[in-house]
Amino acid sequence: MKVGGWIILIWGVVVFITGIAAAANGAAAGGSYLGGGIGFCVLGGYLLHRAKQKEDEKNQNDNWSNE
């Protein structure tokens, strides 16, 4: 999940930058690229957040069972 989150986050940044460049050049599709880029960034950030939460939960369970 962590690797997928990084991949989607990087892809979202690339799409967002492409949308900004398209909007600056007057393309009509700039808005959909911007929205898609933001959506991918949010999804990637969420996946990274969940991966960190799962890792913390696993460490708490391991620490509890060792006591």
Image: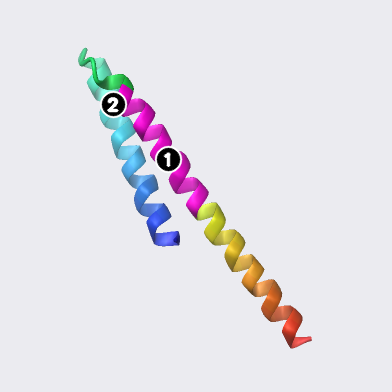
Q: Which residues are magenta?
A: 32-47
Identify which residue is drawn at 35% across, 32% down.
Answer: 36
Q: Is residue 16 magenta?
A: no
Single out the residue that lies furthest toward the right.
67
Q: Position of residue 67 (x, y in %)?
A: 79, 86
Identify which residue is drawn at 42% across, 40% down.
Answer: 41
Looking at the rendering, which quadrant does residue 52 occupy? bottom right
For numbered disc 1, what is the local secondary structure? Answer: helix
Q: Report the quarter where the N terminus lies.
A: bottom left
Residue 48 relative to residue 40: left or right: right
Residue 34 relative to residue 48: left or right: left
Q: Answer yes or no: do the residues labelled 1 and 2 have beta carbons within 8 Å? A: no
Q: Is residue 37 magenta?
A: yes
**Relative to 19, residue 54 above or below:** below
Amino acid type of the residue that numbered disc 2 sits on in the rendered structure: Gly
Mark 1 or 2, nearer chain start: 2
Q: Position of residue 58 (x, y in %)?
A: 63, 72
Amino acid type of the residue that numbered disc 1 sits on in the rendered structure: Cys
**Relative to 66, residue 46 above or below:** above
**Relative to 52, residue 38 above or below:** above
Single out the residue that lies furthest toward the top.
26
- For disc 1, the marked residue is 41
For numbered disc 2, what is the local secondary structure? Answer: helix
- For disc 2, the marked residue is 19
Identify which residue is drawn at 39% across, 40% down.
Answer: 40
Q: Position of residue 14 (x, y in %)?
A: 29, 38
- Spatial CA distance of label 1 from label 2 is 13 Å
Colour option used: rainbow
